[in-house]
Amino acid sequence: MARNDDGQENRVHAAQLASAEHAQGQLTETLRIVGILNSGGAVAMLAFLQAMIGKEPQFHCYKPYGLVGLAVFVFGALLVPLTFFARWQAANFSINSSVKGEMIWTMRMMKLLLASTLFFLAACAIAGFGITRL
């Protein structure tokens, strides 16, 4: 009877590990997407600003919004490597069986991911507001 309990416990443990690996894979993809969105937004903002340079009255009206939007996109993109670092630190604490350290770094990672996403949304709003002012 003990063998059945051990076998069932091993299956449950294997299922939990598979679920954790799936969640880590999803988190990696989310971080990549946020990084691509912020970086792509910065490149698009640079291209739009370059296209606006020849149009004097519109360019001067849009320039402050474009530059602030660009800065916010870049800052959001710079948060993504910090988020990967926080994720790496959380994994190190997990390997060393430090639950408190793992939780602290996991919360930091989630806050950085949320901040990067909010920076993307804020930059889009700033750029959109600037376009409506043209």
Image: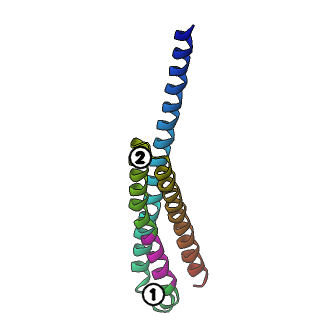
Badge 2 amino acid: Ala
- The numbered dot on residue 91 is 2
Give yes or no for residue 22 being in the magenta stretch.
no
Residue at 51% x, 26% y is 13
Q: Mark 1 Cα within 10 Å, few/some/many (few <14, many 20+)?
A: few
The residues bearing labels 1 and 2 have C-alpha atoms spaced at a distance of: 51 Å
- Point 55% across, 70% down: residue: 124
Colour scheme of the rendered structure: rainbow
Q: Where is residue 106 in the image (x, y as percent from the top left)?
A: 50, 53
The overriding secondary structure of the stretch rendered in magenta is helix
> Where residue 95 is drawn, which disc sits there?
none
User: Would you place residue 58 above or below residue 34 in this image?
Assistant: below
Q: Where is residue 65 in the image (x, y as percent from the top left)?
A: 52, 82
Q: In this view, does 30 lie above or below 118?
A: above
Q: Eyeballing the image, is 36 above or below 64?
A: above
Q: Name the residue under label 1.
A: 55
The answer to if 73 sits in the magenta stretch is: yes
Of 12 and 127, which appears nearest the observer?
Answer: 12
Q: Where is residue 67 in the image (x, y as percent from the top left)?
A: 45, 82
Q: Is mark 2 on a helix, strand or loop?
A: helix
Front-most of residues 60 and 41: 41
Task: Quadrant for the N terminus, please.
Answer: top right
Residue 71 quadrant: bottom left
The amino acid type found where label 1 is placed reads Lys
Residue at the spot 40% in from the left edge and 53% down from the top edge: 89
The C terminus lies in quadrant:
bottom right
Query: Are the residues at dot 1 and dot 2 in contact (C-beta closer than 8 Å)?
Result: no
Residue drawn at (48%, 32%) of the image: 17
* Highlighted magenta segment, given as a residue range: 65-75
Q: Position of residue 56 (x, y in %)?
A: 45, 91
